Image (cartoon, rainbow, N blue to C red):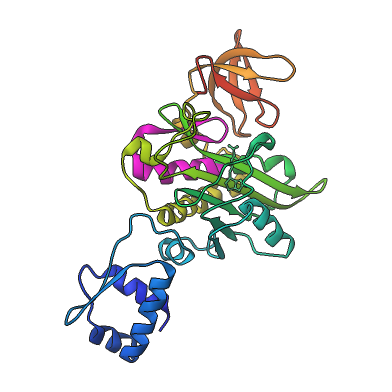
Amino acid sequence: MKKEELLQMLAEADTYVSGQELCEHFGVSRTAIWKAIKQLEKEGYQIEAVNNKGYLLQENDDMMSGMEIARHMETTSMGKNLFFHKETGSTNVDVKQLAEEGAREGTLVVADRQNAGRGRRGRAWISPAGESIYMSLLLRPRCTPDKASGITLVMALAVLEAVQELTGDIVGIKWPNDIVINKKKMCGILTEMSTDMESIHYVVPGVGINVNQTSFAEDIKDTATSIFLETGKKANRSRLVARVMYYFEKNYEIFQKTWDMSGLLEKYNGFLLNRGQQVRVLDPKGEYEGVAQGINEKGELLVEKDGELIAVYAGEVSVRGIYGYV
Ligand code: BTN
């Protein structure tokens, strides 16, 4: 009997499961059951044991572990090869190393804490324990390097769909890949890759989701939020990781058919908060304002300026609302 199987049985029961029942089901001794229960407790599960009744798994609101993530994973490849760390430097760095060692597509690294978390534009991503998700995925796309930027948008869409299960309609995307609630950012994505002139070795989208934070530091509190702050409910981070993988696998299958956003365009644009909004394009060659229309199949943001439609590429510029972040 594997401890995962015992966990599954306890999780599926809505009342106590007797030691006798477990022994019979798995064909093992009471001592073996008791030992496996102790192992699960060591992993962080709380299991109540009552004489003459048996064992009851206490549903923990936010249990973050490799076993718990695996228990919720419903994919066929994405996230199946899973590494969980209580603490690491950066999950993106971990995945890049695994990629260099030949790890397979779909390998996922998740951490409860990062001590060298990385954000975009060389910034740090502050990554304390117990409240956030830090996850990075290994992809080996068979497309040319110019198509890879779309992968970040596919991941943003997956995070949005997973978060929406918890928050309802209040969540949206700020182009290209910030997930936003009430004009505040609750998720950022940093995609790193290794390529040569004509092919991609690997791509690593790394996702940081603010899940259960109850407050933010003074300097970011006006632009950052968490799922808890917006809904008043604590979420199970392990389950959310698995749901992101579930949606990513589905969306990536569509993306792979054309290696662009054409199959996902309508869905993405439906969630795009900038759509129809006056935006300021922070182009290093000269800033300008226009009205965002949505993305094209390359994932570029189409901005209408003086009757002309300009395709804005995410690598070079960022976009702000004219009254704030969105
Ligand atoms: C941003 O600046 O908006 C992107 C933040 C990306 C943070 C995530 S957390 C998991 C992964 N590992 C990292 O070091 N960074 C990404």
Q: Position of residue 115 (x, y in %)?
A: 61, 50
Q: Position of residue 172 (x, y in %)?
A: 44, 32
Q: Position of residue 27 (x, y in %)?
A: 33, 91
Most prominent secondary structure in the magenta stretch?
helix
Compare residues 260 and 88 and report the one nearer the observer: 88
157 drawn magenta: yes
Q: Quadrant of residue 23?
A: bottom left
In the displayed image of the protein, which residue is found farthest to the top?
Answer: 306
Q: Quadrant of residue 212?
A: top left
User: Residue 238, can we see it?
Assistant: yes
In the displayed image of the protein, which residue is found farthest to the left?
Answer: 52
Q: Position of residue 65 (x, y in %)?
A: 46, 62
37 drawn magenta: no
Highlighted magenta segment, given as a residue range: 154-179
Compare residues 183 and 148 and report the one nearer the observer: 183
Kindly identify the residue that appears in the image at 51 percent across and 53 percent down: 249
Q: Along the horizontal axis of the image, is 120 left or right of 18?
A: right
In the displayed image of the protein, which residue is found farthest to the right?
Answer: 197
In the displayed image of the protein, which residue is found farthest to the front?
Answer: 218
Q: Along the horizontal axis of the image, is 48 left or right of 263?
A: left
User: Residue 140, can we see it?
Assistant: no
Residue 154 position (above or below residue 73): above
